[in-house]
Amino acid sequence: MSESPALVTCNVLVLGAGAAGLRAAIAAHDAAVDTMILGSRGRADAHTALAAGGINAALGTHDPDDWRQHFADTYVEGHALADPPAIELLCREAPRALEELAAWGCPFARTPDGRLDQRYFGAHRHRRTCYAGDYTGRAVLDTLLAQVTRRGVPIVEQTYVSSLLCDGGVCFGAYAFDVATGRRTAYLADAVVLATGGHTRLWRYSSSRRDENYGDGMALALAAGCELGDMEMVQFHPTGMTHPEEWAGALVTEAVRGEGGKLFNAAGERFMGRYDPDRMELSARDRVAAANYVEIAEGRGGPHGGVFLDVSHLDREQITEKLPRIQRQFLEAQMLDITAGHMEVTPTAHYAMGGVVVEPESHGTGVDGLYAAGEVTTGVHGANRLGGNSLTETVVFGRRAGEAAATRARTLGAAHRSGSALVEAGEHLEALVGPGDAFALPVLRHLRDLMWRGCGVVRSAASLREALGALDDVRLASARIDVQPSPGGWVDLARACAVRAALPCCEATLRGALAREESRGAHRRSDHPEEAPSPYNLVVAERGRGTLGIEARAPRRVPDELRPLLAEPPAEAAAGKLLE
Ligand SMILES: Cc1cc2nc3c(=O)[nH]c(=O)nc-3n(C[C@H](O)[C@H](O)[C@H](O)COP(=O)(O)OP(=O)(O)OC[C@H]3O[C@@H](n4cnc5c(N)ncnc54)[C@H](O)[C@@H]3O)c2cc1C
């Protein structure tokens, strides 16, 4: 495959067809610039479709809510690491973003008098989560897709981006190949929006699906000269499936505990009594995840490496009515009837709070012409994400990034191009093609095991150093991956690209976790169990020849007028508030 690449030009190139990418493309198109979207999978097949519980905005449908309280809850849940100007934009603009989705036909649940219904989500002071059954992400994605289609914005599907095209600190496009045919194309643009999602598939148990969320966008951004922030901040959901392999890590919704599900270890002990005797299974997400992890790590797990979650004491009708998805999921995957037998569950990597550092207003990355939005970025979630805020983030900042990219495209004097950057991107991809004695999938699996052991729910200097050492072996194996076209097309090449992206993402995450000598939010260090007196962000950037440098920075201060609101929400019973 050494023929020269096809050339395609547009004003704004959006990488990723999840909610953030689609919203960015709509904004760019509406600003009257020629826009195009690339996605590595099919058009309706982005990770966003998995989101179930809901999307937040302080609409005040039922409670006296406003954006300031939404700000305070987000900041407090993020353990003082999130960027206040970014949260302020998120919370101020969320109502407009949701009303827009509703006006575009998103089938949100309504109150009897026709307003957008809102329900509780854990750690929110008020009911501010809008929802569409238990398929909110799918509903948002389909609504945005319909708008993209209506506007005639092209989505180039099954197209894998292997490099950003950059020269002299300016990004002017992306280099990609068609996963079916292998055909290479250089997409040249005035501005690029990166919306490629997170990196949680890099853990053994992950709520992401196969072939997504290997951190591609973070690695592309790092190579382009961007900074990555707080990569060690990964939210672990307390309950994912343990088996079979293709289901490992798939989410078991917190609603199971909300409905009265009880956790037991292999000795039959209801162990939450030792971790949070007051709230038991309704304790905070990070505390239940840590409890499950410790029980398993200390050898009190079941045959598939999990603990047991039991609802068999509940009425069959209650289970069928309230937990139909989970009931079906276990029947399909394990032939298990959860009304009679217990589920085996493990914590699962669920959401990346860290990512590309962006300026709040435009979501510019610091590299001219390159913007980013959605889970690939960092800023609004700090050390722990408030449930329902990530879908809001995709639409609020997708729009902002798309508008900023369009403004750049309209005002740019001359298009930036570089033949040598194009040649380099081609060579970078071709270097992966050829025979080898290793396969990408087992290498990825090895990496995921390594991250699980070394940088799981609870980490220590020893586990992190061991993982960093083991990463060098994976680096060597990655140079020997066999990449040939197969009847399935160039899937091997896509996976080899995923390995190449995963390596710097893992390294940045491990280095961040090692440097963060404290426990804060989702980051738990067994050797540093206390929170440091002052919060700090950890920023990683390339310092030449692939070497990563790391630096601590003080977060910006919360404006004085918002400080009085910063208090933990009242510790009411969490029943009925666990939705994700
Ligand atoms: C099970 C589950 C439940 C959740 N529930 C909720 C919820 O209730 N509320 C909430 O707010 N959040 C929830 N989340 C989180 C939320 O779904 C995500 O954070 C959000 O959808 C991310 O959207 P995105 O547009 O940033 O990225 P994604 O939806 O991940 O889209 C990324 C896009 O980039 C493409 N891409 C990636 N790499 C490349 C590449 N190299 N080349 C080309 N294209 C590429 C992908 O194909 C995809 O189109 C949940 C997550 C999970 C896993």
Image (cartoon, rainbow, N blue to C red):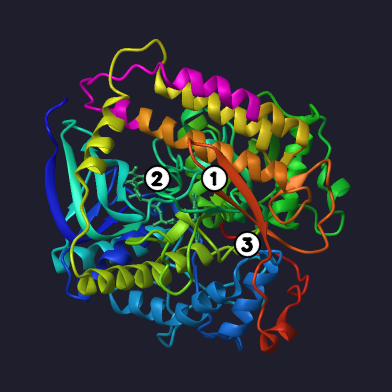
Q: Secondary structure at mark 1?
A: loop
Nearer-N-terminus badge (3/2): 2
Q: Which residue is mark 1?
A: 251
Q: Is residue 408 visible?
A: yes
Q: Which residues are magenta?
A: 468-494
The amino acid pointed to by label 2 is Leu
| Location of residue 386 by image quarter | bottom right
Q: Which tag is nearer the camera, tag 1 or tag 2?
A: 2
Q: Secondary structure at mark 3?
A: loop
Q: CA gap, disc 1 to disc 3?
A: 22 Å
On screen, residue 224 versus residue 350, left or right, reads left
Nearer-N-terminus badge (1/3): 1
Nearer-N-terminus badge (1/2): 2
Residue ID at (52%, 22%): 474
Q: Residues within 10 Å of mark 3 (few under 14, many from 20)?
A: many
Q: Is mark 2 within 8 Å of ligand 1?
A: yes
